[in-house]
Amino acid sequence: MKTAILQARGDGNGLLSFQREQFVVSIGAGGIRADKQEGDHATPAGLLPLRHVLYRADRVLKPRTALSCAPIAPNDGWCDDPTYADYNKAVTLPYPGRHESLWRDDHSYDLIAVLGWNDSPPERGRGSAIFLHLPTQSGVTEGCIALPEPQLRHLLAEELTAIDIQGA
């Protein structure tokens, strides 16, 4: 298992250490929390495995990775509504419950590694859609981890398998 360590830096960012490298990353605006809840804008503490990779084939090349990898389609979404049975799962849009679209106008979801948070099985209200993705314009995330595309591609090519998120 190839694991990276993520620690909060105290300035709203995190430091991701992998092998002998370190990367400054964006984390949730709510910091790192052991008691992650839906909508708290926090990045959850714990050991989160990388499940699979999604990418916008119309914008970026398929990444080199040992993980399963699939293109994102315009009707792909993710349910973040704890009142629905599909909570914290990929869904097809249109979808009646609260959700986010994976096909975004900005570029933050052009390349996504889906992290294994609250998914085996999902516990309603504990948080959903924790991704390793590209930076947002605001510089913070809603709980995900964001880093520039070259660094994300490097981690995927080096077969990163999990992130140990510390500092809650």
Image: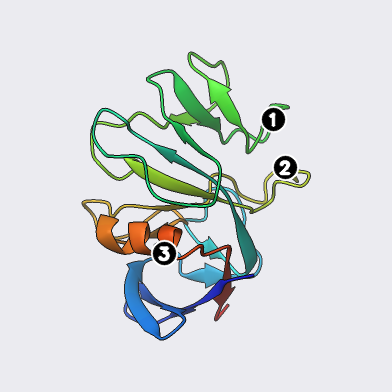
Residue position for label 1: 83
The percent position of residue 72, horizontal first and vertical second, equals: 41, 29
Marks 1 and 2 close (CB-CB < 8 Å): yes
Mark 1 to mark 2: distance in Å?
7 Å
The one nearer the camera, 12 or 59, is: 59
Q: Nearer the viewer, residue 130 or 66?
A: 66
Q: Which residue is mark 2?
A: 124
Dot 3: what SS? helix
Residue 3: quarter of image = bottom right
Question: In terms of sequence position, does the residue under pointer 3 or pointer 2 come before the other?
Answer: 2
Q: Which mark is residue 55?
A: none
Q: Is residue 167 visible?
A: yes
Label 2 packing within 10 angstroms: few (<14), some (14-19), many (20+): some
Residue type, mark 1 in image:
Thr
Q: Residue at x 60, y 70 (%)?
A: 45
Q: Quadrant of the C terminus?
A: bottom right
Q: Residue at x 52, y 71 (%)?
A: 32
Residue with the mark numbered 3: 155
Q: Can the viewer see residue 148?
A: no
